[in-house]
Image (cartoon, coloured by chain):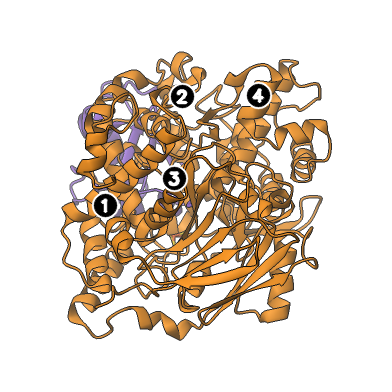
Chain colours: A purple, B orange
Amino acid sequence: MRVLLYATLRAAAGTREAEVAAAPGETVGTVLNRLVAQYPALRDEIFDDPEGTALKPYVAVYVDGRNIVHLQGLSTPLDGTEEVALFPPVAGGSGA
Amino acid sequence: MPLGGYANRIGHVDLTTGTVTYTPIDEEIALKYIGGRGYGAKLVFDNGPNVEPLSPENILVIMNGPLSGTPINMSGRLAVCTRSPLTGTITDSHMGGWTAARLKWAGFDGIVLRGRAEKPVYLYVENGQISIHDASDTWGKTTHETVAYYREKYGQDVSVMCIGPAGENLVRFASIMNEHDRAAGRGGVGAVMGYKRVKAIVIRGEQKRMYDFVPRGDDRYESARKRGLKAIMESAVTAPNKGGLSLYGTNVLMNATNTIGSLPAKNFQMTQWDQAEKLAGETIRETILVHEPTCHACPVHCKKEVEVKEGKYKVRVESFEYESAWALGTLCLNSDKESVAYLIYLCNIYGMDTIETGVLLAMAMEASERGLLKEQVAWGDADKQIELVERIAYRKDEIANLLAEGPARAAAALGDPQMAMCVKGQAIPAYDPRGQQGMGLSYATSNRGGCHLRGYVTSVELLGIPEKADPLATEGKAKWTKLFQDLHAVSDSLDLCKFSAFAEGIQEYLDQFNAVVGLNWTVEDLLRVGERIYNLERYYNNLCGFTGEHDTLPERLLTQPGSGPASDKVCELEKMLKEYYAERGWENGVVPEAKLKELAII
Ligand code: SF4
């Protein structure tokens, strides 16, 4: 499946998007652990622990545009057709 | 003992008579409304609701807060307050750069402009004195030319707040600019300055004076300042050269809002766009970024200066901001970053709000497609956008003259007011309320019309600060909206950059405020001031005839679903609004007398 990377995560992985294997029924956590195995520089950017069981605060993972914290977190099941997007903390607007 | 942080001097400029008088800060007002937006709103309120925005009776208040220009981090901001010619509401718009700091160092908390000059003038501000001078040499010039002219005359170390041709021609969404590309963009504050025939305010202030307004060496002050700085340096958002805001600027948001389906495109007909990446902060950093400027006392450097080196859009401009790139790009389906940079530059030199201009052009594109506007303005046609911006700034012809009135008035005249994506006559910014329900409530209840900065609910809906809230849900949004509105009223009155809220909390604000001003307030005291300011502004609007009827959104957002994750969503405003009024203690958008008394407004 396609995993899209944004902002500093792009720079860390050296790519805008990654193709990661995902079988139907596998969870977001499994896919993300496969992703960091492919791009080791991402591990510390995304996960809070070496085992890859907890996300860093403010790192946002979206499945088809829905933040997994509003789904089932890292246990959110995938069918492999979704698009996963990963963001480091971002904010902005404009100040006027 | 006088309050710390303040210069204790306000200049009152009567442009009709050409006289300047000075008063100290009114301590009672300062203790109730702090400074910046709060103090300015109180002066506009006291001037009365029955003033025509474009009349000698309206006042334009340029106001610092007690923290502006001090060594407190992210304190380089001032507020411009007036009755808006765009919305008819009370309004305030803020600018960064060094103008606020230099105004404080020149010995002023604020300047109040009254009346109307007979001929164009500029003000020169230095060392506690304001003088009025003939501006016939710069009237008609662009903002960049005006800054260059006065820097040549007075030295490169002055700040120049000025208007461009749009302000002179009373374009209803004209901005006031400073340091070339920093804007008090919203609400038409530049048109009020233009009406008063004030081309520029040139300010000289010596930097070493920044320490005069703080208790240097005092433990409470030093530790509060350092804790604030530490929070900024360590925040995952603001940390210099690490955080998303520092590295990519505000435009780091383009891909994020697009992902969650809250990026308005094609005049809010869509909430996702497959071309957005081409304008996003990541792309800009890789391609046309040349410099990363900052404001007074800010280590974040969120400004992203870009350069198009050749071709017909050859330009160098400092502010490729999210809202600007979105309005002039995404909303108009123009994905060409070079022409968008050029359009931002044009808005800046003519002195026009980029958000209002983009929303206006998108409205014109829709109107043209539907045959309501008798001119071909195709989606994504950058050269047509450029042509229109130039015509509007000078009100060159009948169509340009109509568009210069702003999207709401123009759409109504063209036959369908619902084409104007505005609240209370001011354009809605770059977060679609179908993909971010809370922002819908925040827009609808904003006292200055469509605005993302009255209550930045995006903080919980997208970023998760201080906690994560589902952007598609309505639950809890009334509470968040009120809290952010009150909190921003506080930071706008201190006056600190709002982006400080991505690192600092109310406790850091409080500690720095107490230490500088010399008080022992609590968090509740500070938030109560925020609530008081929000209610004062609302009361002013009520006196101008605004009620709950005006706390609404364009029909499109309430009836037509968005795209992507928001494809089955409309903004469920009614539900949130009811809860919000209950939170506020308002009756159908009106502040009852009991509330005014409770907050000691009357
Ligand atoms: S964060 Fe950006 S806008 Fe705010 S003070 Fe710093 S440089 Fe200026």
Question: In the picture, which quadrant includes the N terminus of chain B?
Answer: bottom left
Rounded to the nearest angstrom, the CA distance separating label 4 from label 3 is 37 Å
The reply to whether residue A82 is visible in this rendering is no
Secondary structure of the residue carrying numbered label 3:
loop
Q: Nearer the viewer, mark 2 or mark 3?
A: 2
Question: Quick check: do tags 2 and 3 share a chain?
Answer: no
- Mark 2 lies within 8 Å of ligand 1 (Cβ measured): no
The reply to whether residue B300 is visible in this rendering is yes
- Residue type at tag 2: Leu
Q: Is residue A50 above or below residue B258?
A: below
Rounded to the nearest angstrom, the CA distance separating label 1 from label 4 is 38 Å
- Mark 1 lies within 8 Å of ligand 1 (Cβ measured): no
Q: Nearer the viewer, mark 3 or mark 1?
A: 1
Question: Label 2, on which residue?
Answer: B553
Which numbered disc, 1 or 4, marks the residue that appears first in the sequence? Answer: 4
Q: Which mark is residue A21?
A: none
* Residue B17, x across and y down, in percent: 65, 64
Mark 3, residues whose alpha carbon is within 10 Å: few (<14), some, or many (≥20)? Answer: many
